[in-house]
Amino acid sequence: MTRQDPPPPTLGCRDTPVIKERGQHEVFCGLTGIIWLHRKMQDAFFLVVGSRTCAHLLQSAAGVMIFAEPRFGTAILEETDLAGLADAQVELEREVERLLSRRPDIRQLFLVGSCPSEVIKLDLSKAAQRLSAKHAPHVRVLNYSGSGIETTFTEGEDACLAAMVEALPHTNARQLIVVGALPDVVEDQALGLLDALGIENVRVLPARRRDDTLAVGPNTVFALTQPFLGGTAAALERRGARHIPATFPFGEEGTTAWLRAVSKEFGVEAQLFDAVTDAPRDRARRAVAQAAETLRDKSVFFFPDSQLEIPLARFLTRECGMTALEVGAPYIHKGLVGPDLDLLPEGPRLAEGQDVDKQLDRCMAGRPDLTVCGLGLANPLEAEGFATKWAIELVFSPVHFYEQAGDLAGLFSRPLRRRELLRLEAAE
Ligand code: SF4
């Protein structure tokens, strides 16, 4: 059975003029990525070099782990460090020595910069190089910035993976790297599909455990699973690898187009492609259709937050029958989200960056049925009678590839159903 793909829209959004905004923004910083990265990389430790505020953010977002040895922590910069009265480099290295001698299970250590460490210009790359040389080969020490100055929360993963790419050895092997931290169960599904398509030598970044055999070079191609990995993509390209442009694997259509782009690169026959994808496509379509009953003909407004906004708007409009009023994203990198923009039917306003008051005004005027936004905006909007979805949940939940397509639609339909129930209760 050969499936008919829905035709692309007559006019997509690739050339839609973009409103560029530079004003107050309401986002979490890149430290947030540690929450999902430390779960993914099971032998890694993330040491934030920051303030008590950074420590509180991590503890409250991740919960306090009582029984397990934590795999993240904060080396707190005290007043004396900030005032330049103490040698923060020396203290940091002493802290790392203490940690590594106590925790032989750590094989990768990330020194994560923060606003305070950047303000005092603490050179974490030098510290990482020195510590790496000292603790090789057992521990590899890398550094990246999770600072909240002019960033958004998904940039933490991007900076972390880009730092990993810089440290990879060279290879001339023909290989595919799937890039982006996916929950293990989702990663297994993706690898299973690629294997069934006959694509060999598939690697993932980041791997669950430190993978000293992962290398990069001119015969490497890579496919991104998250649209916020622009820095990682650039780092891979600097190392000679080539990006496979594709829609992101959200929903049935996005997943199929992602797999098709990879399959084209590896010369997979159409017949094999259909044989491998027909059944999961069918399951995904049925699961989405069920969840989308609540979403059909409803409107959605995206505040810029996770950088997933454009692929998700494509999914909600094309597969769930919604209308997008505005799609705001912190950055619009057409090299990455171009294929999603091509499929997003013309109509919504596109906005890059944030000026929260202006966006709130536009949201109020449009009265969308559903608003996707950061945590800080959700409560005030709910109080005004808007149904909201926290953008951050979309990064924490398994939402990629076929088997999660129905759950992805369900994440958006749930707030609408809850609001409807509340309305009915109030009317009784
Ligand atoms: S890195 Fe900056 S924005 Fe993030 S918690 Fe620390 S001080 Fe706050």
Image (spheres, rainbow, N blue to C red):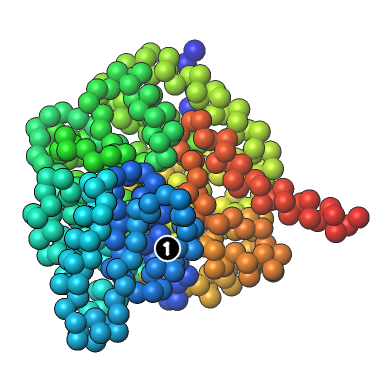
Question: Where residue 5 sits: x, y (%)?
Answer: 48, 27
Can residue 410 be seen here? yes
Residue position marked by numbered label 1 in the rendering: 58
Compared with 271, 284 (above or below) is: below
- Which of 66 and 365 lies nearest the eye of the viewer? 66
Mark 1 is surrounded, within 10 Å at the Cα level, by few (under 14), some (14 to 19) or many (20 or more) other residues, namely: many
Asked where in the image residue 53 lies, by quadrant, the reply is: bottom left
- Left or right position of 84 against 303: left
Q: In the picture, which quadrant includes the C terminus?
A: bottom right
User: x%, y% of residue 249?
Assistant: 42, 37
Please, what secondary structure does the residue beneath circle 1 have? helix
Q: Is residue 18 visible?
A: no
Q: Is residue 317 left or right of residue 164?
A: right
Q: Is mark 1 within 8 Å of ligand 1?
A: yes
Question: In the orientation shown, which residue stands out farthest toward the front?
Answer: 102
Whether residue 423 sits left or right of residue 63 in the image: it is: right
Q: Amino acid at mark 1?
A: Leu
Q: Residue at x 20, y 30 (%)?
A: 175
